Image (cartoon, rainbow, N blue to C red):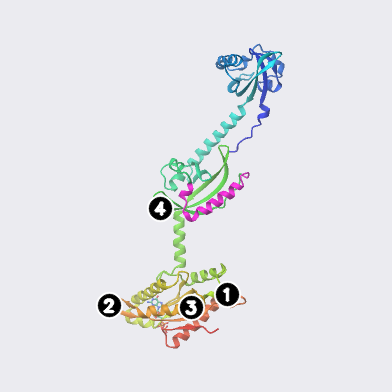
């Protein structure tokens, strides 16, 4: 839909006539009408011959109205004929001039044929565009600063509308984007607007969440690029519905990261997320690692069965999760052993949090239909340990593990701080 620049200067010519008898003609005028030279036009008995037959009466009436002062000169649009009979759309700019001592009418003709042709081509290419995208399974939207100008049926359907007209009635399509992604889209559109001259400028493929009119969430993958629309710069968004893939990906990620029994992080995901915290600038001096293990758990399994053992693990996890600060990372290290990354001011603060958790468990009985079971844990606490100037999670866990072992050997149900 590229617009074609029209050079208007090449398309206007001047004629002066009195009672339609040509008095002066320039070469541009002659060429516009398909004559070889101005003299060929001057040889015409009446310039009315250049006007389409059904416009001649109007032209004659207008001439007399102008010359008698009833009408004022203005700009009019006519269909004129070239020498070979082809019609041409012209603008006629009228002036009353003095020619050899008497009034005459000067008309400057602007040939609009190319402009009309360009407009027709533009309309045809836009019609083709609409036909093409209407059959597309991809959603296509054209907007200008988020005011929708065009959208296809697929776009409307993906975003939960029955008809494209309902989308076009929106003041701004920002309202269909989930608030978490609105700022991102505004920035992308602004950056693309800065590339207005570059029609190929396109955003990278992005996945965002949108909200359907019924409140349902829909995930879409989209690309945005600059296009020209009805002669103006606009943005075209092409999108596909990725909700199913997104949910599947989430499910797989959940399965890969979350321990099935307890629904907290598994060992691998805990390690990855802990490493990420420090990679993202988390302060190692205000983080502490806790490794803890249920005391005499074999005995619980042996006395009450494996099923009750599983329930006891879940009970403990829920109790601790409810009492941990939001920024703590909690994972199952394996079996009945768990790990926590705590963000605290200092080791004493971390120790107090460990003891608070331990007391919570100690003070509440785990009740099943038939039994009230007292659970306790032993905890090993370690500050983050550095190896060769960078944080070592495995060295820190090892230190916490040693402290945990010490807690077990010292009588269980206690917190021990690792020796530096
Ligand atoms: N029910 C259940 N038992 C588990 C699970 N994971 C590990 N266990 C059991 O936990 C018990 C751990 O026993 P031990 O390593 O001897 O430790 P403990 O009996 O807790 O003794 P201390 O650690 O010294 O207090 C084993 O019997 C494991 O089979 C689990 O997911 N569910």
Give the prevailing secondary structure in the magenta stretch: helix
Residue 349 numbered tag:
3
Q: Circle 4 is placed at which residue position?
A: 216
Q: Circle 2 is placed at which residue position?
A: 370
Give the SS element for disc 4.
loop
Give the SS element for disc 2.
loop
Depth order, front residue of 330/268 = 330
Looking at the rendering, the stretch of residues picked out in magenta corresponds to: 173-198
Q: Marks 4 and 2, how far apart in space?
A: 44 Å
Disc 2 residue crowd, few under 14, some 14–19, many 20+, Cα 10 Å: few
User: Going by the picture, which residue comes out furthest to the bottom?
Assistant: 410
- Residue in view at x 45 percent, y 54 percent: 243
Whether the residue under disc 2 has CB within 8 Å of ligand 1: no
- Residue in view at x 52 percent, y 47 percent: 238
- The label nearer to you, 3 versus 1, is 3
Earlier residue among tags 2 and 3: 3
Disc 1 residue crowd, few under 14, some 14–19, many 20+, Cα 10 Å: some
- The label nearer to you, 4 versus 2, is 4
User: Going by the picture, which residue comes out furthest to the left?
Assistant: 370
Earlier residue among tags 1 and 4: 4
Q: Marks 3 and 1, how far apart in space?
A: 21 Å
> Magenta stretch: residue 183 in it?
yes
Earlier residue among tags 4 and 2: 4
Q: Circle 1 is placed at which residue position?
A: 391
Q: How far across and down, in percent of the image, does residue 318 sit?
A: 39, 72
- The label nearer to you, 1 versus 2, is 1
Residue 67 numbered tag:
none
């Amino acid at each position: 839909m590229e617009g074609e620049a029209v050079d208007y200067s090449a398309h206007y010519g001047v004629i002066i006539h009195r009672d339609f008898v040509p008095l002066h003609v320039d070469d541009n005028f002659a060429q516009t009408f398909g004559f070889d030279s101005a003299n060929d036009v001057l040889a015409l008995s009446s310039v009315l011959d250049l006007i389409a037959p059904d416009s001649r009466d109007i032209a004659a009436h207008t001439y007399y109205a102008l010359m008698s002062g009833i009408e004022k000169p203005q700009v009019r649009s006519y269909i004129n004929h070239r020498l070979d009979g082809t019609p041409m759309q012209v603008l006629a700019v009228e002036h009353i001039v003095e020619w050899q001592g008497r009034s005459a009418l000067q008309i400057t003709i602007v040939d609009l044929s190319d402009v009309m042709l360009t407009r027709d081509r533009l309309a045809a290419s836009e019609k083709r565009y609409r036909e093409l995208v209407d059959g597309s399974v991809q959603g296509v939207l054209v907007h200008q600063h988020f005011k929708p100008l065009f959208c296809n049926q697929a776009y409307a359907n993906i975003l939960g509308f029955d008809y494209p007209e309902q989308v076009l009635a929106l003041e701004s399509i920002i309202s269909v984007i989930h608030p978490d992604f609105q700022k991102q889209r505004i920035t992308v559109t602004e950056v693309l607007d800065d590339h207005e001259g570059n029609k190929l400028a396109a955003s990278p493929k992005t996945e965002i969440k949108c909200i359907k009119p019924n409140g349902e969430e829909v995930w879409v993958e989209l690309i945005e690029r600059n296009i020209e629309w009805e002669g103006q710069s606009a943005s075209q968004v092409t999108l596909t519905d990725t909700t199913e893939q997104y949910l599947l990906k989430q499910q797989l990620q959940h399965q890969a990261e979350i321990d099935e029994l307890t629904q907290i992080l598994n060992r691998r995901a805990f390690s990855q997320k802990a490493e990420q915290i420090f990679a993202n600038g988390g302060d190692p001096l205000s983080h502490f690692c806790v490794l803890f293990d249920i005391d005499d758990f074999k005995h619980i399994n042996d006395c009450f069965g494996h099923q009750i053992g599983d329930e006891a693990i879940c009970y403990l996890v829920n109790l601790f999760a409810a009492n941990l600060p939001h920024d703590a990372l909690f994972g199952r290290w394996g079996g009945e052993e768990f790990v926590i990354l705590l963000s605290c001011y200092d080791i004493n603060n971390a120790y107090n949090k460990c003891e608070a958790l331990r007391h919570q468990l100690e003070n509440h009985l785990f009740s099943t239909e038939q039994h009230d079971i007292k659970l306790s844990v032993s905890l090993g606490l370690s500050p983050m340990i550095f190896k060769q100037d960078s944080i070592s999670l495995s060295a820190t866990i090892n230190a916490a593990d040693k402290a945990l072992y010490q807690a077990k050997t010292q009588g269980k149900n206690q917190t021990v701080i690792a020796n530096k």
